[in-house]
Image: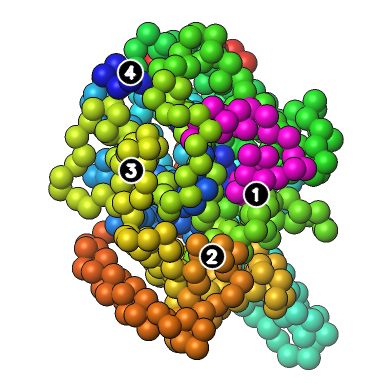
Amino acid sequence: TTRNSRPNIVLLMADDLGVGDLCCYGNNSVSTPNIDRLASEGVMLTQHLAAASMCTPSRAAFLTGRYPIRSGMVSPYNLNRALTWLGGSGGLPSNETTFAKLLQHRGYRTGLIGKWHLGLSCASRNDHCHHPLNHGFHYFYGMPFGLLSDCQASGKPELHRGLRIKLWISTALTGLVPFLLLIPKFARWFSVPWKLIFFSALLAFLFFASWYSSYGFARRWNCILMRNHEIIQQPMKEEKVASLLLKEALAFIERYKREPFLLFFSFLHVHTPLISKEKFVGHSKYGRYGDNVEEMDWMVGKILDALDRERLANRTLVYFTSDNGGHLESLDGGTQLGGWNGIYKGGKGMGGWEGGIRVPGIFRWPTVLEAGRVISEPTSLMDIYPTLSYIGGGILPQDRVIDGQNLMPLLEGRASHSHHEFLFHYCGVYLHTVRWHQKDCATVWKVHYVTPKSYPEGSGACYGSGICSCSGDVTYHDPPLLFDISRDPSEAVPLNPDNEPLFDSVIKKMEAAIKEHRGTLTPAPQQFSVFNTIWKPWLQPCCGTFPFCGCDKEDDILPTAP
């Protein structure tokens, strides 16, 4: 094999793509020829699991090879499950070591193009302590946040929609008070001091200003495009961004084709608002969402073409995945704007149900991995970290727990059993579910201690709130729900002591594993504390003089080598 000459590495991560959205994973209504080609020329993982069912914690785990609870990148609250503001102070702590940093030390040129969503600054506007360039990337071009419906000027608000409605109602009610106080004054029923009227009006105004200064400008504050440390567009021109990202990715490959490079292409597709180029609109049989999936597949094709053109395909490991399952609650009227999770129950935001965490996983490395292999063993997005460290010749940090396992023995066929015995599925800071892959056989047990309550009941999703809760509005199971995932992947038939003689021993084994796992957790600063997640004007990235932020430098500069 070509192991000794270190391969180039291209990581492709979709945003909110369901495992049932690709042809190679059994979808026959959407056309994804380029991703299918990747699967037929490489190895396909069918039980590939994200470490969380939400963007920020899943991406933190992917980059560090560790459960996000270890880095403090999980939320104790239902409201902020992923980072909410670029002007917040939470983010991936600087003492965490990403795979980009490991490979940077091994002489790789590292680039991130697309979505980051792991924080930006800590204490002042431009300290950029959580920025990709502080986490091992030589080059960054993309959105430090990520795509939201709010990024479209005409889009429906997505960020804290329910809370915003309550704030508008409260504003209207507090605004009524000064007018109500004028009635008795002018009707001469009794005297109301002008001071009181003035103060109640001032209070109403201050209350409005306090929340509207952030939520009223969500597009300007969050939807920005950056190159390295510089803001290129604020707010970002959302309809052009896909072409810009693709142009940057191809330029990066061209620039570093002679040295080993790591390109992490983090798609804004297929997150709402589902912006597709004109030639893809109406292209699929599956509405705006299908169009967006097909455009993403076309972009994957362009990247693969560039590798072929530069004769790099044989010495490049290409990996494709999604950060979490499809978002079932993403609707516009009756139209589904989120992904499809195949036969699996649940979706994005649900702690343990398979639909929120089972994602595509495809590896292609032509001279090393046998084409067309399918592996059904449990694997994790956290495994990418030790796998890249192994093939890039890096040394794993010895001073912390790494939860991922090197996948090369499994991918090359030297091992047939995954090294993961237990996998823990968290919802925020709460442990909801545990998976046990028995060492001596193919059985995979899954036990749920907590599951989300769906609205309306029986719908399988939380249409009322837009995303399911991790605590409070949940069902606690005692005895816990047990499934045999190897026989019942859609989690349809819960087992009980009457129909499963091993019930008690499996639960006991799980409880011992949880106890051992909890013993390895050390406290980490909470990146999702209330203070960290609120919008802070002094941290808001700004092109110009705050609060008059805005620019578009994309038209007048060409990409230059960093």
* Disc 3 from disc 2: Cα separation: 22 Å
- Check residue 415 in the rendering and tell me which mark sits there, or answer none: 3
Magenta stretch: give its range: 17-43
Of mark 4 and mark 1, the one earlier in the sequence is 4
Q: Which residue is mark 1?
A: 20
Residue 321 screen position, x and y as percent: 52, 40
Residue 208 screen position, x and y as percent: 62, 62
What residue is at 44 percent from the left and 25 percent from the top?
A: 365
- Check residue 2 in the rendering and tell me which mark sits there, or answer none: 4
**Position of 93 compared to 295: left or right?**
left
Q: Which residue is mark 2?
A: 487
| Rendering quarter of residue 243 | top right
Type of amino acid under label 4? Thr
* Disc 1 from disc 2: Cα separation: 19 Å
Tag 4 and tag 2, C-beta contact below 8 Å = no
Q: Nearer the viewer, mark 4 or mark 1?
A: 4
Quarter the C terminus occupies: top left
Of mark 3 and mark 2, the one earlier in the sequence is 3
Of mark 1 and mark 2, the one earlier in the sequence is 1
What residue is at 68 percent from the left and 33 percent from the top?
A: 32
Of mark 4 and mark 2, the one earlier in the sequence is 4
* Disc 4 from disc 1: Cα separation: 34 Å
